[in-house]
Amino acid sequence: MVHSWQATKYDEIFLPHQSWGDELIAQLPLSGGETVLDAGAGTGRDALKLAARLPKGRVLAVEASSTMLERLREKVDDSGLPVSVIEANLLQPLPIKTPVDAAISVATFHWLHDHKAVFSNLAEVMKGGAPLLADCGGKGNVERVKSAFRAATGRDPDGGRPWNFAGPEETAGNLAAAGFEVMEVRLVRDTIIFHDQMEHVAFLSTIVLGSQLESFPPEERVEVAATVSEAMGEWVVDYVRLKIRARKA
Ligand SMILES: C[S@@+](CC[C@H](N)C(=O)[O-])C[C@H]1O[C@@H](n2cnc3c(N)ncnc32)[C@H](O)[C@@H]1O
């Protein structure tokens, strides 16, 4: 089952995801008529930005969470931009008939336990030579947040729905096995510093620890995130990003 995101809150708070998405979009060689798949499109930030650059093309926004899908559909309808919303699980073969010219994915793959399956499912719906550009949490990601969560709650941060923070070597192997030519897979440290504790707590409770906090009653979750923030002693999130550049062979 896919974690149920707080889609409205997700759109209201500061997200480093914006710059991760912009970075990928800027690397796509687009002429305006391509079909581009956004894997784990969330509420559609990048799908809409991409669609604005595709007057004769289309974005296929693939998403599985019902709360994200509801907000995504609203935003796509309001925009009038060429985005098709596809409700699908990236761990299963994708219901896409015509192969796409490119695929991107921002902050999604670390939620998926089987990268080999995800890469194969994407490869199946991509044209030969189509680029796959992705960013997700990588090996060593949010270690400080995890230790603070453990210290503050006594619970295992990987106990419920474990993250899949993969390293470059295994990722390159998974991509090659799925039929991709690997151009670059690397880890990049990207520590985010927040202005104040309120912002830090909102970010921890909505984004980083959303799934860990599901085991607490809803009315206690912000409080628990605040104790994690206290235990960290600094208003930071120690991201380590896995950056992927590959091409369907
Ligand atoms: C952190 S959000 C990132 C959303 C968006 N790409 C962004 O950067 O704002 C991760 C997204 O992946 C989606 N997701 C997680 N598991 C999925 C799966 N198995 N199939 C499709 N989408 C999935 C989640 O529902 C969520 O919208």
Image: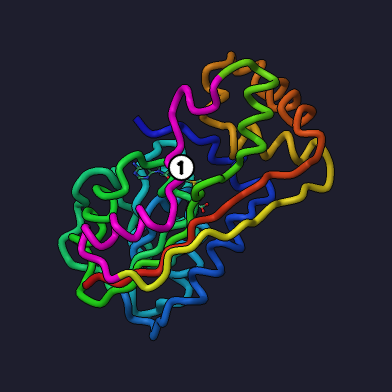
Residue situated furthest bottom in the rendering: 31
Q: Nearer the viewer, residue 200 or 119?
A: 119
Question: What residue lies at 43% left-to-right and 64% top-to-bottom?
Answer: 185
From the viewer's perspective, is residue 239 above or below residue 98?
A: above
Q: Does the image show residue 35?
A: no
Within the magenta stretch, is there residue 161?
A: yes
Query: Which residue occupies the extreme front position in the image?
Result: 169
* Residue 129 within the segment the image draws in magenta: no
User: What residue do we see at 33% from left, 72% from top?
Assistant: 131
Residue drawn at x 47%, y 22% as measured from the top left: 159
Residue placed under numbered mark 1 in the picture: 68
Please give the count of numbered marks on the rendered protein.
1
Residue at disc 1, CB closer than 8 Å to ligand 1: yes
Q: Measured from the top left, where is residue 119 in percent x and y?
A: 28, 55
Q: Examine the rendering and report whether any part of residue 213 can be seen.
A: yes
Residue type at mark 1 is: Met
User: In the image, is 141 to the left or to the right of 192?
Assistant: left
Q: Residues within 10 Å of mark 1 (few under 14, many from 20)?
A: many
Badge 1 marks a residue whose secondary structure is helix
Identify the image quadrant of the C terminus.
bottom left
Location of the N terminus by quadrant is: top left
- Tell me the magenta residue range: 156-181
Residue sitting at the far right: 196
Q: Report the front residue among 237 and 50.
A: 237
Residue 79, horizontal then vertical, whole percent = 49, 62
- Residue at 20% of width from left, 58% of height from top? 96
Q: Residue 58 location, x and y as percent?
A: 34, 70
Rendered view: 237 above or below 2: below
Q: Position of residue 178 (x, y in %)?
A: 22, 58
* Residue projecting furthest to the left: 97
